[in-house]
């Protein structure tokens, strides 16, 4: 059974859940009011009886690292280890998301083309939307083709805040 160490931190955008395995690899990062979504994704990836949640204080320094991100150390999220389940395609999309530089954005079609799957923008969008490790796997850096702030599980206002925090100038 997978043991997940969990902590909750305060951020300028509200409380954030952090869950990692015993090797301190992030398995889930989600806003508190979306914890139902987090549990749903954990159940999909590991099965309802496949993991055990254990309270922890700053597991592996991950909570402190995420606080530092919100305090302006933007590059720190690129150093944080993740271990996600999901399909091979989802993991491919999530790896590509981590390669989008801080302060930059892509649209779904660009990301699909980058993955060698031109025309798969909707599939990329679906994989993006099922990302269990918010912020660290920066799904917020994907926007609509016309520059609009398309869906973000944490809400469009949070997406805008994160992009501005990272130096992306919104029009």
Image (cartoon, rainbow, N blue to C red):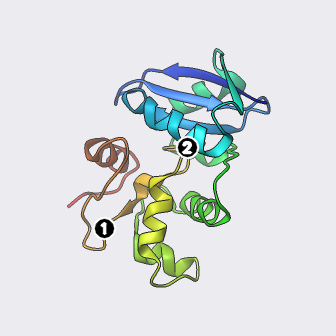
In which quadrant of the rendered image does the C terminus lie? bottom left
Count neighbours of disc 2 (C-alpha within 10 A) and say few if under 14, some if 14 to 19, many if 20 or more.
many
Dot 2 corresponds to which residue? Answer: 133
Q: Is residue 74 above or below residue 168?
A: above
The part of the image, by quadrant, that contains residue 50 is top right
Using the rendered image of the protein, determine whether residue 169 is visible from the camera's viewpoint. yes
Compare marks 2 and 1 and give the one earlier in the sequence. Answer: 2
Query: Which of these two is toward me, 98 or 67?
Result: 98
Residue drawn at the location 72% of the way across and 26% of the way down: 60
**Residues at badges 2 and 1 in contact (C-beta under 8 Å)?**
no
Residue drawn at the location 32% of the way across and 41% of the way down: 158
Name the secondary structure under disc 2. Answer: loop
In which quadrant of the rendered image does the N terminus lie? top right
Name the secondary structure under disc 1. Answer: loop
Residue drawn at the location 44% of the way across and 77% of the way down: 110
Residue drawn at the location 59% of the way across and 44% of the way down: 44
- Label at residue 144: 1
Looking at the picture, how far across and down is residue 14, in whole percent? 36, 26
Residue closest to the far left:
171
Count neighbours of disc 1 (C-alpha within 10 A) and say few if under 14, some if 14 to 19, many if 20 or more.
some
Q: Is residue 25 above or below residue 124?
A: above
How far is the residue under mark 2 from the one under mark 1?
21 Å
State the count of labels.
Answer: 2
* Residue 12 relative to residue 117: left or right: left
* Residue 23 relative to residue 111: left or right: right
Q: Is residue 72 above or below residue 10?
A: below
């Amino acid at each position: 059974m997978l043991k997940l160490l969990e902590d909750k931190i305060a951020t300028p955008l509200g409380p954030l859940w952090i869950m990692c395995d015993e090797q301190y690899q992030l398995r889930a990062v989600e806003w508190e009011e979306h914890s139902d979504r987090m549990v749903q994704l954990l159940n999909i990836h590991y099965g309802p009886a496949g993991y055990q949640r254990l309270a922890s204080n700053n597991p592996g320094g991950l909570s402190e690292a995420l606080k530092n991100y919100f305090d302006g150390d933007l590059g720190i999220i690129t150093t944080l280890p993740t271990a996600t389940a999901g399909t091979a395609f989802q993991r491919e999309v999530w790896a590509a998301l981590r390669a989008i530089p801080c302060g930059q954005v892509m649209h779904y079609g660009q990301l699909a083309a980058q993955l060698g799957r031109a025309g798969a923008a909707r599939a990329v969008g679906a994989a993006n939307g099922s990302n269990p490790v918010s912020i660290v796997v920066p799904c917020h850096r994907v926007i609509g083709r016309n520059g609009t702030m398309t869906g973000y599980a944490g809400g469009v206002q949070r997406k805008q805040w994160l992009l501005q925090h990272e130096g992306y100038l919104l029009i």
